[in-house]
Image (tube, coloured by chain):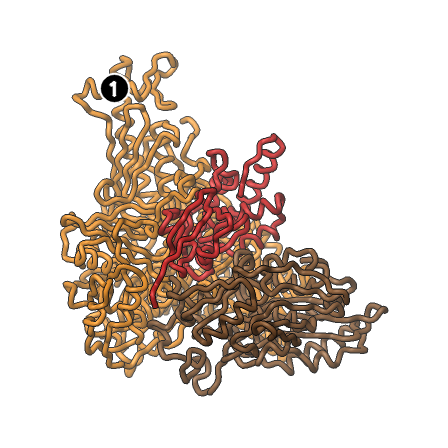
Amino acid sequence: MHLPRFTYVRPGSRDEAAGLLDTFGKAAVLVAGGTDLFPRMKYRISTPEYLVSLSGVTRFLPALDEDGALRIDALMSLGDLSRSPIVRTHAPLVSQAATCVASGQIRNAATLGGNLCLECRCLYYNQSHTFQFVEPCFKLGGDLCYFAPKGNRCWAIFASDVAPALLSLDTVICVTGGPGKQRRFPVAELYTGDALSPLTLLPSEIITEIIVPSAFGTGRHSFRKFSRRKGYEFAGLSVAVALQVADDGRTCRDARIAVGSVAGGPVRAAAAEAGLPGQDLSNSETVRSAAATAAQEIRPIAHHGYQAAHLRHCLEVEVLRALTEAAGPAPLADV
Amino acid sequence: MEHIKVVVHLLINGDAHDLAIAPEATLSEVLRGQLGLTGTKDGCGTGECGACTVLADGRPILSCLTLAFECQGREITTIEGVACNGELNPVQQAFIDAGAIQCGFCTPGMVLATIALLNETPHPSFAEIEKALEGVLCRCTGYNKIVEAVNRAAEAIAARLKGGTSCQTP
Amino acid sequence: MSDPLKYVGQPIARVDGPAKVTGKARFTVDVQPPGTLVCRILRSPHPHARILGIDISAAQKLPGVKAVVTADDTLKIKHGFVETPRYPADQYPLAVGVVRHVGEEIAAVAAVDEHTAEAALKLIKVEYEILPAVFDPEEAMKADAPEVHPSHPKVTEPFRNIAGKTETGWGDVDQGLAESDYVRTDRFESHLRTHGYLEPQATVASWEDGKLNVWTSSMGPFIKRKKLAQTLGLPLSAVRVHKSYVGGAFGGKIDLFSHEFCAALLSMKTGRPVKVVVSREEIFAAYRHGQPLIVELTTGVKKDGSIVAQRIRTINNCGAYKGSGVVVIFLSWGFAMATYRIPNMAYEGFAVYTNNTVRCPQRGHGAPQMRFAIESQMDMIAEEIGLDPVAIRLVNARLPDEQLPNGDNVHNCGLVECIEKAAERINLRERYGSSRNKAAEGGSLRRGVGIGVSAYFGGSLIYPNSSSVIVKLNDDGSLIILTGSLDIGQGAETILTQIVAEELQVPISQISIMAADTETTPVDIGVWISGNAYVTGNAAREAAMAVRHKILEIAAQELETETCQLVLSEKAVSVTGAPERRMSYAEIYEASVRSRRGDPIIGEGHWRTMRDVPTHPSLATAKGRWTENYAFDAQAAEVEVDIETGKARLVRAVTAHDCGFPINPLNVDGQIDGQVSMALGHAFLEEVMMENGRTLNPSWLEYRMPTIGEMALSESIDVITESYVVGQPYRTKEVGEGYVSAILAAIANALYDAVGVRLYTTPFTPERILKALKEKAQADSGNA
């Protein structure tokens, strides 16, 4: 497997990169770690004319804001993220989720921003199409879905592990679209939920940093990745739970439950969350009912050999486990 | 589109190389094809087997998913560069002694991932070994003897340090 | 009492370890002669289609393209895994007129680089007429099924698409079943798995001065030479297969592959070296995998558990050509009959063509599928008649010197001891049934234990039928071994070195080994029928013995004594009781050259298994001897199941094995560990997912081979039944394939022990386990 030919450009800043993306338009693709993009390029499912690399951009180390929020460079590698003491302390859930991604080698190249911008995946799409599945599917610009031949949409899965973690922490995303074109918004607004075009970013926009607010950042949490093998592969489903607990140590003040790998974007279990504030988290019935609600409101898509009904069942199991873990007597230590 | 090669300056196993490469050349292609360092293996090319693992500034990365161009300014170590003082690296020796090698195709990646692990964690737990090696597939050994090799290497390195001899591993 | 062995039986580190651990070992993918062209292959996108036309003109015109070949550029000579009168060669290296599976090879290009080769493939236009296709073997057998090939002319049943049939038996099964106290019938299904060798398929071919030089990732240079010569229309002597290290094979690199043929043909066309490295995706989606087998099994036993009769019917989904599909239906009979006494047996196996990729051997070659069925049913029977799993196996296990129905003998069979020891190590008698459905450490986790047994053949008669080895003494007393054997990771070079070291008392470090070159090393059976340690090993021993005889004769002559008075030690010969009367090998070499008209002391040895048997057994009737070395084993498993998610894992595996004796215990353990890992992949994780002949998961990301995170603790127990005596032939038994089977069955049985559900289909996915648990809960509540 080898990469297709492209013109390589290496801007010195993110604004400059955004400018280049603007200039080249659809002919260009942005690359940071490349661990998601390069396999797709080798399979020829992405063949950009221009590769705009962020490798020449100066990065900053994670730091705390005055209000206690943690700012993390989107170009931080997942490996650095999982090793960073300040992230471990102030956003342990992020660190934990980052550690669950793929393998150490990939984490050392893959970036936080890249993981948030993963392309959606499906068995049919993520292979070259030279002699198998030659007809292009929706995602390849065609007019069919191999997974659901009678359907009229793309059923690929957004499989980031970090995205649900950030979603559960009410993280804010900062993007630049070039000089003077910065904006910030909650991470939930990054995702369309449509696998065909999973991100709301404009073609020239680049995620620059993420801000983890202190409220959830250091609260009780749990991250669970359900997959057939440990690490290494993408999640069958992943669950991130973040809780704010009253001083009594058991009454829920606020809760976030986010699930990955079940749809075209990360999803919140909003109904399950809504039932938790004011409830006694040490009551097993409370968490059990929340998990059941989550499994009611989220309908996982079958993917990568996982059956939908089984994923739904495991969603309930894993949400229950995550809630139990998060609500447990002591917050989880570092991973 | 005119296809232009660019000259890059790479530091591989302590040796500086000025090479004309195409922008799409991966590090593994340059190592294997242009430099003849075929110890770095390519088992899949898509980042799944880990046989192509090399160290960049001491950290394991996949050379099949790394543009050679982006390795400028980084110190790259391949399996050809881990011997110490003309002898096998203790990790290499431990892999031989423990029977952790069969076909040998994953061995370079395993050894490099282990060197990186032991540099950061001289006495790893099983969980740490598991985490460090989860990205290198081995089909032959079932991993039992690889874990044993990592433990043996940790002991050998500790014994060397105690004895006052150290090995400058990357 | 002879001296203790110094090299054989010792856990000696691999002789190729330093080369492999430094990256110096040269694999085929590392071979890169100057001026090498890149070869890429055009594959069929259809599972079944007629080729109406191929237009290569545009591809030929592309700058940088040096040659394009299709079937019209070939001699259209067929090849096959089996080439016998009953099962003649059946596959063209490049498709002629029809393609029968997705990925079948149609054309190949040689170009200056990957980009050009890839662009050239896109310029080849093929016109197809789509034909109806069939993928399920039982569908394919139906009278109205699409025809992949006509049924074999000798098959009388009205089934379509029958590639081959094995039918054999003895006694009277109907009467046996009638006389049984307990009879049950079950159906088991195995799924499609693949080898997962780390080094991709790769070949470098270089046609130079009328000789084809080939480096290829293989399992036997001599059989590759034969098939290349045959399909290219060259004399054997015009093909030289060179040695390169092999990054794993597991059965998947023995057939002739089209890429090997194409690289050779393109080199002959262009006069330049041609290299092809097959992509991992192509390997998954177009290459040969293992064999998914359906096993229908009826067994009748007496109250004491002894088997009275067994009826077995297997159906093998053998893909678009015969491949080794017609062999597996023979072998799976062998794997059924070797372990237990079966007074009455009726066996029939069908290999059925479908429009799937072709099948080839995969480690165990039918044994895992068959043992999974038999050993699962064994436990079910035991439970029904109130025996424990150990007792029922002991009642039926073959004993030493038993004669098998095909005329083979089990010789010093250690099966009973294997069963006892495996059971004891994992405490099976006490634990089995005691923790069923009881929480272990965590709330949702259940653990169980189980056992299985298996037997495996060690070498059979198949081309080239024998191995030869040459041992040369150097004038400094060191040695060189020449062998056609190939190290594919199993340690062939190491054990042959150990044997020669032992016979001649030369340290391992002073023996070099030249291997696997069809021109400079002697013929070898290859490393794919589990006979290397026995056949090539005995050839090496014979060669060393020839050297030993010469050394002793010269020493006796020079030291003026009898050869029986001499002992060998550390590259020297001395007189017993008078160590000062001593000659080094260097001195002996010099004396030999001086006194024997230049004889530099070269020994030659050869070996063939079953020397009085003319040929291999009949694949159709199973008549005729198969092997003279049966290895036996019992394996015990401890499995953990999460009853909430259905996820299960192998925690611990115990392998009690009768491999005769271990030539190298480190290698034996390594083989066992690897097989346990492969079996746990088989049991829980790995599956080539296919849809209408297309592969859904052609990558390691989605084909879930075990990572270190899935590692199971693997322990082994030697059951020694044979011995090694210097100067005498030995009987060792194989260790490379047999231990992938009983452990699969043990896992199935341990899964049952943990949660009380029986799975009849592999793999044991969380979905299947959970479904079975739900059904059981419903049945239990219905019964309550």
Do we see residue C741 in this rendering?
no
Compared to residue A7, the image places residue C653 above or below, namely above
Judging depth in this view, the residue of C334 and C45 nearest the camera is C45
Say which quadrant the N terminus of chain B sits in. Answer: bottom left
Secondary structure state at the residue bearing disc 1: helix
Residue A86, image x, y percentages? 70, 58
* Horizontal relation, residue A126 to residue C265: left or right: right
Residue A140, image x, y percentages? 42, 78
Q: Which chain identifier belongs to the orange chain?
A: C
Do we see residue C272 in this rendering?
yes
Residue topped by disc 1: C590
Q: Which chain is home to disc 1?
A: C
Residue neighbourhood size for the residue with mark 1, other residues' Cα within 10 Å, grouped as few (<14), some (14–19), many (≥20): many
The amino acid type of the residue labelled 1 equals Glu
Judging depth in this view, the residue of A206 and A235 nearest the camera is A206
Q: Which chain identifier belongs to the brown chain?
A: A
Q: Which chain identifier belongs to the red chain?
A: B
